[in-house]
Image (cartoon, rainbow, N blue to C red):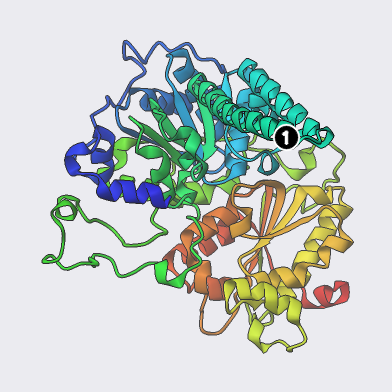
């Protein structure tokens, strides 16, 4: 990454490609017709996947037609990866060379797994030990051993091993020196053949996949691609994204800027006041004066965010049909965050826990998709983790990840009670997840794993990208001041409320939470109006705890 940044800094503006000029805001992206379905070139695409919906087709047409940049906005459950697979296949049909990147190994491996059935010639860069077992056969290490060029390298390696073994059997110093001289030449030949083998494999592959960091490796240093696809771009640092971009002609970024951005651990790197410039106008270089300085100076501002702010919604296409959530679970995030554009697919819009493909009883907990257990009244007060005994080291260690963490014992009891009701009704524990914004609360909930093996517990941040049939969200905050801390972050709440397929249970104090922000107030209002509203029975909770 440092090499990329240095190279970028040293570039003269006159050397910038059309893509780099657009990325810096020095020029605007080439216009694309708003409706490509009737376009002569892009309106008659032969789709490989017949199940694509209209918004997915529109996003693919837009990505194919764009000359510099295209953003594919994939809200939760809308089939973003599914869309990218079709895009890659369409590009391969057109004879284009593609570099596919993601911020993590799992994000890249996910695409390799989805591409594999299509028998596409692809190459996964990265150490085999860090890859999923299902994708190792597509890795550079394996292909260098199984390809024709790799066979020649293996022959040289075998000859080196024979020479090495013969040294032990040779007593004559003269003969040993001769063997060492041969070994030296063989090692040179081995390195050269190995390098040529790698180059041959990379050059001969139409789809190369790597992490953003891995794209800066020596194997790709002299390679050029027609297009770079960055998946999970809204979870990647912008600096990482630049690694594969310098040699690209075009980029497609896919992600959801309305979910959580990458985690920034350094407090010095987080948001500074907007509009402030780090250098005075007098000290700016000529090059930096050319670049429009817009938005925030934050590492958490992703390339996806910045490009959208810089060039506006014309560079973006949103996927609108979601295949995860019951319609009632989807409604609030759709209305509040996605301009009411999300549509629940017919197959998921009315499905409930009782409709699982194994026997589940009809109960009040398996026939309701959205339940709100309102703890208002002051009997479920939160607890600051610092108030706990020093002996509670496990809770303190976990809480330190979020600093001054919070917990709520009565809420934890309600979670346990609801999980028990679901399991008693026949719902499998592995189909249930409990998420909460606070690690101290996770520490309180930890015994659930022993009581209900298979259940998943996680922080909201850690559960991004995941889904479960039933999700219980413990909001924790309950205080007289109406202080909600980082619970007020819309993107964190969006992740929390969009993880379930069939059942979302929210447990929290509406009185405290609704005072946190207008967004939270609207959410509490929505839950009170649309959810199955329940008020806990303190005596029952105490008995079952």
Which sits in the foreground, 201 or 210? 201
Observer able to see residue 79: no
Q: Quadrant of the C terminus?
A: bottom right
> In percent of the image, x 58 and y 18: which residue is there?
120
The picture quadrant where one finds residue 179 is: top right
Which sits in the foreground, 387 or 361? 387
Residue 207 coordinates in the image, percent (x, y)? 51, 24
Residue 423 coordinates in the image, percent (x, y)? 85, 53
> In percent of the image, x 50 and y 50: which residue is there?
333
Residue 501 coordinates in the image, percent (x, y)? 67, 44
Mark 1 Cα-neighbour bin, 10 Å: few <14, some 14–19, many ≥20: some
Observer able to see residue 177: yes
> In percent of the image, x 82 and y 78: which residue is there?
539
Count the marks: how many? 1
For residue 355, above or below residue 96: below
The picture quadrant where one finds residue 536 is: bottom right
For residue 243, above or below residue 400: above
Circle 1 sits in a helix, a strand or a loop, which is it?
Answer: helix
Would residue 381 appear left or right of 491 to someone viewing this image?
right
The picture quadrant where one finds residue 273 is: bottom left
Would residue 376 appear left or right of 448 to someone viewing this image?
left
Which sits in the foreground, 393 or 452? 393
| Residue highlighted by disc 1 | 176
> In percent of the image, x 25 and y 34: which residue is there?
17
Residue 142 coordinates in the image, percent (x, y)? 68, 28
Name, please, the residue furthest toward the left: 282
For residue 223, above or below residue 215: above
């Amino acid at each position: 990454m440092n090499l990329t940044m240095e190279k970028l800094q040293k570039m003269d503006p006159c050397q910038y490609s059309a893509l780099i000029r657009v990325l810096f805001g020095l020029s605007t992206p080439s216009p694309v017709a708003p409706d490509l379905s009737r376009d002569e070139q892009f309106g008659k695409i032969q789709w490989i996947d017949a199940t694509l919906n209209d918004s997915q087709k529109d996003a693919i047409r837009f990505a194919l037609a764009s000359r510099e940049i295209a953003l594919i906005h994939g809200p939760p459950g809308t089939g973003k990866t599914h869309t990218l697979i079709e895009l890659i296949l369409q590009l391969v049909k057109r004879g284009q060379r593609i570099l596919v990147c993601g911020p993590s190994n799992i994000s890249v491996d996910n695409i390799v797994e989805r591409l594999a059935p299509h028998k596409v010639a692809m190459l996964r860069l990265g150490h085999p030990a860090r890859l999923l077992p299902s994708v190792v056969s597509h890795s550079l290490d394996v292909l260098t051993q199984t390809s024709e060029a790799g066979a020649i390298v293996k022959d040289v390696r075998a000859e080196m091993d024979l020479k090495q073994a013969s040294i032990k059997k040779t007593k004559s110093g003269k003969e040993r020196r001769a063997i060492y001289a041969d070994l030296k030449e063989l090692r040179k030949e081995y390195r050269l053949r190995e390098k040529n083998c790698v180059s041959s494999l990379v050059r001969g592959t139409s789809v190369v996949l790597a992490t953003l960091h891995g794209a800066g490796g020596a194997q790709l240093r002299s390679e050029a691609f027609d297009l770079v696809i960055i998946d999970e771009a809204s979870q990647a640092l912008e600096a990482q994204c630049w690694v594969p971009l310098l040699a690209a002609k075009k980029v497609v970024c896919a992600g959801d800027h309305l979910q959580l951005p990458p985690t920034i651990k350094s407090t010095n790197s987080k948001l500074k006041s907007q509009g402030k410039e780090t250098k005075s106008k007098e000290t700016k270089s000529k090059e930096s004066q050319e670049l429009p300085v817009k938005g925030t100076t934050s590492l958490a501002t992703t390339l996806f965010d910045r490009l959208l702010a810089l060039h506006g919604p014309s560079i973006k296409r949103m996927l609108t049909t979601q295949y995860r959530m019951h319609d009632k679970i989807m409604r609030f995030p759709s209305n509040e965050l996605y301009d009411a554009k999300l549509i629940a697919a017919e197959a998921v819009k009315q499905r409930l826990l009782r409709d699982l493909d194994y026997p589940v009883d009809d109960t009040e907990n398996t026939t309701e998709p959205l339940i709100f257990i309102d703890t208002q009244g002051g009997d479920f007060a939160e607890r600051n983790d610092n108030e706990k005994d020093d002996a509670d080291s496990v809770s303190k260690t976990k809480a330190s990840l979020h600093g001054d963490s919070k917990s709520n014992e009565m809420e934890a009891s309600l979670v346990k009670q609801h999980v028990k009701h679901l399991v008693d009704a026949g719902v499998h524990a592995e189909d249930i997840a409990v998420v909460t914004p606070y690690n101290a609360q996770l520490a309180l909930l930890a015994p659930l794993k022993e009581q209900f093996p298979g259940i998943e517990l996680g922080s909201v941040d850690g559960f991004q990208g995941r889904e479960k049939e039933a999700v219980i969200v413990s909001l924790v905050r309950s205080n007289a001041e109406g202080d909600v801390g980082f619970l007020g972050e819309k993107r964190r709440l969006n992740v929390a409320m969009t993880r379930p397929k069939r059942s979302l249970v929210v447990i929290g104090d509406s009185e405290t939470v609704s005072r946190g922000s207008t967004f939270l107030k609207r959410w509490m209002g929505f839950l009170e109006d649309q959810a199955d509203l329940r008020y806990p029975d303190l005596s029952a909770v105490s008995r079952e705890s």
